[in-house]
Structures are given as C-alpha cells and as structure tokens.
Amino acid sequence: MNFSAFIFKQRSSIPKYIVVLSAASGGASLVAYADSKPADENPTRKKKVVVLGTGWAGTTFLRNLDSSQYDVQVISPRNYFAFTPLLPSVTCGTVEPRSIVEPIRRILEKKKGNIKFWEAECFKVDPKNKKLYCRSNIGTNLDGTGEFLVDYDYLVVAVGARSNTFNTPGVVEHCHFLKEVEDAQKIRRSVMDCFEQASLPNITDEERRRKLHFVIVGGGPTGVEFAAELHDFVSEDLSRLYPAIKDLVNISLIEAGEHILTMFDKRITEFAEQKFQRNGIDVKTGYKVVAVGPDSIKMQKKAVGEVQVPYGMAVWSTGIGTRPVISEFMKQIGQGGRRVLATDEWLRVPECEDVYAVGDCATINQRKVMEDVSAIFKVADKDNSGTLTIKEIHDVLDDICVRYPQVKLYMKSKQMSDIRALIADAQGDEKKESVELNIEEFKKALANVDSQVKFLPATAQVASQQGEYLARCFNKMKDAEEHPEGPVRIREPGRHRFRPFRYQHLGQFAPLGGEQTAAQLPGDWISIGHSSQWLWYSVYASKQVSWRTRMLVVSDWTRRFIFGRDSSCI
Ligand code: FAD
C-alpha cells in the first residue's frame, strides 16, 4: 500500500497538526491528530519514547524506566503481560490462564508521568520520518480501518517472534502452537475433546487410539515441558476419570536432531530421555516432519524412510521466526538478507537513528576483534613507536575486554590468568613475553579470540535483562553525555556513553514431570530431581510481576496438589 501524507496546520492558538494518510491503492484513508508542538518549536518538550510490545523485554523496560523524564507510549496487540514459562502448565490446567497474566495498565498505573497505552499492532516502521503505522485490534477509527499514525523520538522494538513452521505443509492448518495464552487454552480444550471423543460409543478401537495419540513436534524445552505436563495430567488425573480408555493413550515427542534438550548439559539430556522412556513417552529422534494432514503426520528418517503416523492432536514447537513487521523493517534498512534483526552491543539498530531492539525479535551482532585489530593497536600504541609493550596493552586491556567480551572468554577458556599468557601462547615461547609486539605479532596473539563470540538464546531471561539494561541507559541518557561510563571508542575519539549490554546467565530449568526438574545453574552445576522441583517452584513464584499473580500461581499449585487438575471442557 502506498501512503501519501498531507499535513494541515489548524487555525488555533495552540498549533495542532492533522496528518492525513491516503492509501493510493485501496482508497482507504487514515486520520491522526498530534496535539503537541513540533520538536523545534518546543525545546522543553519531553522526548517521545514509543515501546512496541508488552512481553518480557517491553514490560521490563517499562517497569525500570524513569517515565517522568519522557513522554511514553506503549503499543501492543496484547493489553497484558504473560509469564510465558508457565504456559505449558496452563495447557493441562495445573495453572489457570488468568494467574499468569498481568494487565499492562496495572503495571503502568504504578509509574510516574502519563504513560499511554494503545491496544494495536504496528504494521510498518518508517525510520526515516520516525513514524509508526499502527492498526487497532478492535478495528474502530473514523473510517473503520482502525489505522493510525504515531511519531517517536526514540523507538524500542520489543515485538518478540512468531512460531516457525519452516514452511512445512499443513502445520498452520492442523497443529497447535504454544506461544500465547490463547494457544495454551486451545490445547487444554483440545486434549479434553480428544478424551471425550475417544470415549464415545460406536467408534472403532483404531479410531480411539488415533484420537488419543498426542504428538509434540520439537524436542526443545517447550516441547519437552509440554510432553511432561501432559503425561502427568493423564497419569494423575485423566486415567482415574477415563479408566476405559486410559491404556490407549500415547504421547510421542518428535525431534529432528539426535537428542532432545540439546541446549542443556549432556547429563540432563540423557536423564530426560531415560525418564521419558520409563514413563512411556515415545521419543522419536532423527525424524523430520515433512507434512501434516488432518489425521496423520508424515515424517522421514534416513535409516527408516518415510512414515505416516495417525494422531488426535499435534503441538508444533520447533523454534521461532521473524514477525512480518520486522522482516519488512529489515528490508527497508538493508538487513533483508539476515534471519534476525541485528543490533549493536548497545541494542541500537545501527542503520537507523534512535531505534533500539530487544528480546526475541533481535540479536546482538558482536563486533569482532579482528575487524578492529589495527585500530586497537593504534589506540594502545600511545607513544606511536609502532610496537606495543606489555604495559601499553595492559593500559587498554580493561576497555578492550568490555568492548570485546570474547577476549576475556577466550582467556578463561584457555585458563590464561592475564594478557602475558595470551601473548606467550601466541609466541610459543614464555621468554618472549617481555618483548615488544609489532602489529603482526599483535594480530597473531588475538587471532583466535573471535571463536568465543556467542549468540544469546531467545529466552525471557535475555529479554528481561535487555529491557532492564536499556531502561537504565534511558534513565541516565543526559548524565552520560557529560560523564560517559563506557569503554574507549576504538575507531573514533572519546568514550562510549554506556557500557555495552552484558548478559548474565542465571541458569535454566527443564521440568520433566512427576515432580522432577533438571536445573543447570551457572558454573556447570547440575541438579536433577525433586529438590530442583522445589527450586523451580520458588524461582517461578518469586519472578512473578506482581503479588496478585504470585498469590494466584501459588494457590493454583496448592489446589492442584489437593484436588488435582480440572478436566472440564470449557
Ligand atoms: P514476547 O514476550 O513474545 O512479547 C512480544 C510482545 O510484542 C507481545 O506483547 C506481543 O503482543 C507484542 N507484539 C507482537 N507483534 C506486535 C506488533 N506488530 N506491534 C506491536 N506489538 C507487537 N524463556 C525463559 O527464559 N525461560 C523459560 O522457562 C521459558 N519458557 C517458555 C515457555 C514457552 C511456552 C514459550 C513460548 C516461551 C518460553 N520462554 C522461556 C521464552 C520467552 O518467553 C521469550 O524468550 C520471551 O517471551 C521473549 O520476550 P519478548 O519481549 O522478546 O517477546
């Protein structure tokens, strides 16, 4: 759709601007009013920060932002925050959907200043003119299209990701996803429908078996947790309520790789596979799903060939893909060839001014040391001698390690205590460590450090730490202009305003059912079993965004312990 914009200035003491957008192709028009003065006419005006998304990244940003400093607007098709790690528990009624959501207006109510929320989705970003094209969820506007235009000074993109089907035929039509609260509610209803349909008279045993075959595609944490939840639901609650068909239930977990939970330590992967085998969950590794029909799933394995498996309900959980608004934005800014929107280490989208991207919709493009090695040499070579002494390297090492964290990771991986060890390692001779380095020797010393550049996982932990970091930067924006706290700039004079974002991994959990959880904590500390399940309960209770949801979640867990899960089809 091509939009053309006309701006009229209204005759009044306070200038108002009416922006009329007309869609050349469809004849639709869009009218939006902006009652603030333009930036140059009103220098005391607060800068407008627009946040897209009310998920982990967006909400954490908002909760930590000093909103009295900015004019804040939030745009999201969802008027609530959802605690996604508990979504698998919602699929089987262990936790109720409303217990894991917090209305965004309740969160904003506690903030200073007047924060506006629009329940709408942004369908186009125009970074040149700093404008966002949005469409209301409810679809009400003067002309009924529900479209409106928002301008910004700073944009925080936190729209998350969508489920990735890898264009597998039939997935969208026949599979459930597990990404949103609505998805979890649909799965819960669908599980119960399968049980009720399988209990009906006049159906064959074969049909009953098909209805009670639950297939989960994807052996990552979400697929594994859902399989475990479903198994618990069936064995603890449904087998009592449906004694006649309980033995016909089959849960299959299909994974294209050789193992499930590959992002966890090997010990956890092995334990999970063995536990699922003991529980009767059929883990099919090495199988690639190639098509999904209404009643059967077609998959391939090299050694076996193609197989067709009948199923009653399928959940697709194979990873995430880019949302259309982000793909379109990436094309505009010259990132069209990439899979995910790239930011720099300060979470800025490099190709456009004042646009930041956080959470699952973006990935940090860590600058390589070897791209800057000559510039680093120049900065370190203070006396312009053409060689670096150990002292000169030492003087810039802290800044280098902040700017390029891979240097420290490399030294740690090689158990090197300091820069002397790194240089000695490159020179292959301990005695040469006191010798001055020329540029070639310096390059050789740093040649392998970039192997330690790591991409961050798409998790709530990363998204919320990024939201918190960015809010801190926004809060100190003015101060940091005068007192920069970041490392020395390598290719330009001066220092960076802020330290780059640094992720701190706090560990990860894999609930495996039967009140057992695998926990992988920092320092390669592994714990599997009932004690980790209690750790999981306490961490997830403490991470709730409000006391209200904390109370609701804990009371749901208690209710489940006492009365079991509710199996009503509502
Ligand atoms: P989201 O939380 O997905 O939020 C995106 C927001 O953007 C939403 O409010 C959405 O409505 C809004 N939005 C979408 N499109 C638009 C648009 N066009 N315009 C405006 N707004 C838009 N991570 C962990 O660390 N631990 C776990 O145990 C864990 N368990 C998980 C279990 C499940 C079932 C799932 C699905 C995920 C889990 N994750 C977990 C991953 C975690 O949920 C994500 O990494 C996290 O939600 C990413 O946060 P985000 O803010 O980037 O995106």
Image (tube, rainbow, N blue to C red):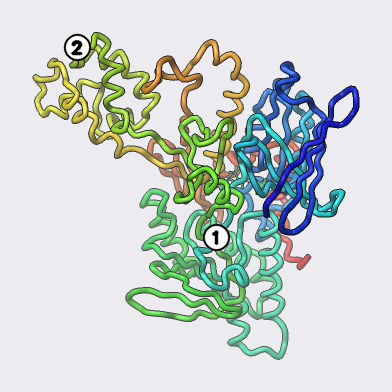
Q: In this figure, which residue is indicated by the disc labeled 2?
A: 385
Task: Report whether 131 appears left or right of 36.
Answer: left
Residue 530's tag is none
Q: Is residue 311 visible?
A: yes
What residue sits 53% from the left and 59% below the top?
Answer: 164
Q: Residue at x 66, y 61 (%)?
A: 92
Residue in the image at 56% along x and 42% along y: 460
Instruction: Give the quadrant of the C terminus.
Output: bottom right
Looking at numbered disc 2 in the image, what kind of residue is underneath it? Ser
Q: What's the CA distance linking mark 1 and mark 2? A: 64 Å
Q: Are marks 1 and 2 in contact (CB under 8 Å)?
A: no
Does residue 554 appear in the picture of this structure? no
Q: Which mark is residue 228?
A: 1
Mark 1 surroundings: few (<14), some (14-19) or many (≥20) residues within 10 A: many
Q: Quadrant of residue 12?
A: top right
Among the 4 quarters of the image, the one containing residue 94? bottom right
Front residue of 389/143: it is 143
The image shows residue 355 at horizontal and vertical percentages of 58, 34
**Is tag 1's residue or tag 2's residue first in the polypeptide sequence?**
1
Q: Residues within 10 Å of mark 2 (few under 14, many from 20)?
A: few
Q: Position of residue 544 (x, y in %)?
A: 66, 39
Q: Amino acid at mark 1?
A: Ala
**Element type at mark 1:** helix
- Element at label 2: loop
The front one of 221 and 250 is 221
